[in-house]
Amino acid sequence: MNYVLGIDGGGSKTVCVLMDDLRQVLGRGEAGPSNYQSIGIEATLQSIQLAVHNAVEATIITNTVNIDAICLGLAGVGRAADIEVVKGLVQELQNSKFLSITWALQPANIIIVNDALIALVGGIGQPVGIVVAAGTGSIVFGRNHQGHTKRVGGWGYILGDEGSAYKIAIAGMNAALKSDDGREISTSLVEGFKQHLDLENIEDLIEVVYRRGWGVKQIAALAPVVDLAAASGDIVAKMIIDNAVKELVKATSTVIDAVFNADSLLEVVTTGSVWRGRCKIHERFTASIVKKFPEVKVIYPRYEPAYGAGLLALQTTQN
């Protein structure tokens, strides 16, 4: 029996699954963040090591676990220099006395990829299709049967992330302040933000955003205020959501045009918090995509990204 590890490492948490060659998850573990570019290499190693430990401890395997392959899908990993850093982390894992594991890894059985690929593989269950991730940030990533890939977006909150929760929240606050100024039409977003943040005046957003030093995640968490206003019929909020849908449709269409035929039978998996809103973003996105590409099927994830990493690891043991 071959055993492999699939690891999904991001800015908020790390998930590890231990799988056998029947694609069954035998153990699952979680730990803290593992984006080494934001928390450092040592903290990243500790998170990955703990997630692996917790996955192994959760199994019913009584003997020492022998790992034949590992796939790490980590946020921000794409350049050759990043991959070399992560290879060093894998070596540290193999030397760890904290883990009840024996390792049988060869270079070909160590897979290091961006988290978009494992989200695609996990979401669909195979490495062909498109993932449209719209959470705090946004990215669209596709891979065809020939292994050709195309990425659109994912440039971060300053340079991109159109259709993301962050951009929706920023647009909503901007519209509320313009409305309060009298520069734009009246919107319920003014009262929406005041109630949500317990503010006396909408001007107090300055204190919240600037003086409290709010980061991307805290701001992105305000997107539901815009979503609720749009679902309640607010014209300004609906325009913001309309724009988000258009951006996600445009990015997805670009990926389809780049690596798929227009009439391809194709699955598009949607991941992230934006899709769970009340104003039917998922339904509107799906309708727009299917209208342009009738053979496309838009789905929610079948499995989590860590499972996708496990599937990629398994592939290396079966070639």
Image (cartoon, rainbow, N blue to C red):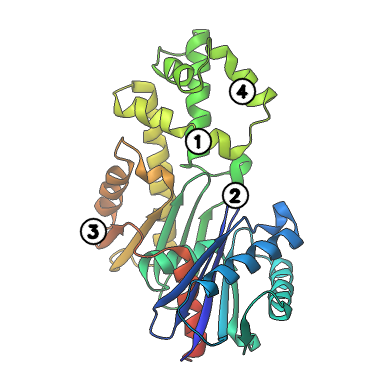
Mark earlier in primary sequence (3, 1): 1
Q: Quadrant of residue 102?
A: bottom right
To which residue does mark 4 refer? 208
x then y, percent, for residue 312: 49, 77
Which amino acid, mark 3? Pro
Location of residue 87 (image quadrant): bottom right
SS at badge 3: loop
- Residue count near mark 2 (Cα–Cα under 10 Å), binned few <14, some 14–19, many ≥20: few
Taking the image as shown, residue 68 lies to the left or right of residue 251, namely right
Residue labelled with disc 3: 294
Between label 2 and label 4, give the one nearer the viewer: 4
Which residue is painted at 35% across and 28% down in the image?
Answer: 228
Whether tag 4 and tag 1 are in contact, CB under 8 A, the answer is: no
Q: Position of residue 172 (x, y in %)?
A: 47, 26
| Residue 200 at x, y percent in the picture | 53, 10
Secondary structure beneath label 1: loop
Q: Amino acid at mark 2?
A: Trp
Give above or below for 17 relative to 286. below
Which badge, 3 or 2, is on the more N-terminal residue? 2
Q: Secondary structure at mark 4?
A: helix
